């Protein structure tokens, strides 16, 4: 299936279960992130509106702490259609197995991993995926000086 092939190229899990979105992952150094995403804009956090996941365009967002990514998310833009969302969900299940919590209150699917969880929210008008750990939703982003 085309989506599964694109999934393997844009979203990967290394043997240590590291979650990547458009080549970005928790712990990736700020300098390497900027090299991978030359159009990325960084103020309090960093955002690349030209990134793609599973072949779909969107906005890659990262928080930066201690010179590396400490928060990671991707919002599909435009919002995925119902058929596209189903394809993305199928691709995640093919890659990560069945989600740990099927019907979370917010309608998201989650896959538990060491140190956090992979979250996919593509129902009810939502169109995003992110890494959830103790840093998620906590403002801990600081762009290194001189960049």
Image: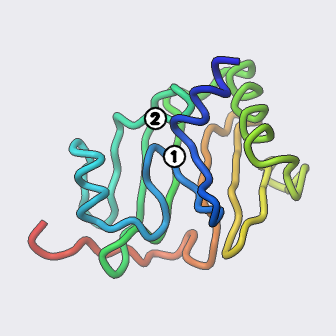
Q: Can you name the residue that lies furthest to the left here?
A: 146
Q: Is residue 135 left or right of residue 65?
A: right
Q: Secondary structure at mark 1?
A: strand
For image coordinates 25% across by 58% down, the residue present is 42
Packing grade of label 1 (10 A; few <14, some 14-19, many >=20) is many
Q: Residue at x 62, y 37 (%)?
A: 127
Identify the residue at the far front of this view.
Answer: 15
Tag 2 residue: 58
In depth, the one of 27 and 42 nearer the eye is 27
Residue 100: % across, % down: 87, 58
Q: Please tell me how crowded label 2 is: few (under 14), some (14-19), or many (20+) other residues with Cα within 10 Å.
A: many
> Please, is residue 126 above or below residue 104 in the view?
above
C-beta proximity under 8 Å, tags 2 and 1: yes
Of residues 78 and 71, the one nearer the viewer is 71
Q: Could you say where residue 51 lies in the image, as x and y percent from the top left? A: 39, 37
The image position of residue 102, as x and y in percent, is 90, 50
**N-terminal label among 2 and 1:** 2
Q: Secondary structure at mark 2?
A: strand
Q: As drawn, is 75 to the left or to the right of 141?
A: right
Instruction: Give the residue at mark 1.
Output: 74
The residue lying at 46 percent from left, 43 percent from top is: 22
Side of 144 where 18 appears, left or right = right
């Amino acid at each position: 299936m085309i989506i599964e092939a694109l999934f393997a190229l844009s979203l990967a899990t290394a043997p240590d279960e590291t979650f990547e979105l458009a080549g970005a992952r928790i712990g990736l150094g700020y300098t390497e992130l900027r090299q991978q995403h030359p159009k990325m804009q960084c103020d309090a956090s960093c955002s690349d509106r030209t990134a793609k996941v599973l072949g779909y365009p969107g906005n890659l967002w990262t928080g930066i702490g201690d010179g590396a990514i400490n928060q990671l998310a991707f919002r599909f833009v435009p919002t995925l259609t119902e058929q596209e969302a189903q394809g993305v969900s199928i691709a995640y299940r093919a890659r990560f197995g069945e989600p740990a919590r099927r019907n979370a209150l917010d309608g998201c699917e989650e896959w538990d991993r060491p140190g956090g969880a992979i979250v996919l929210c593509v129902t009810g008008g939502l169109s995003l995926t992110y890494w959830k750990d103790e840093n998620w939703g906590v403002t801990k982003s600081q762009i290194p000086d001189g960049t």
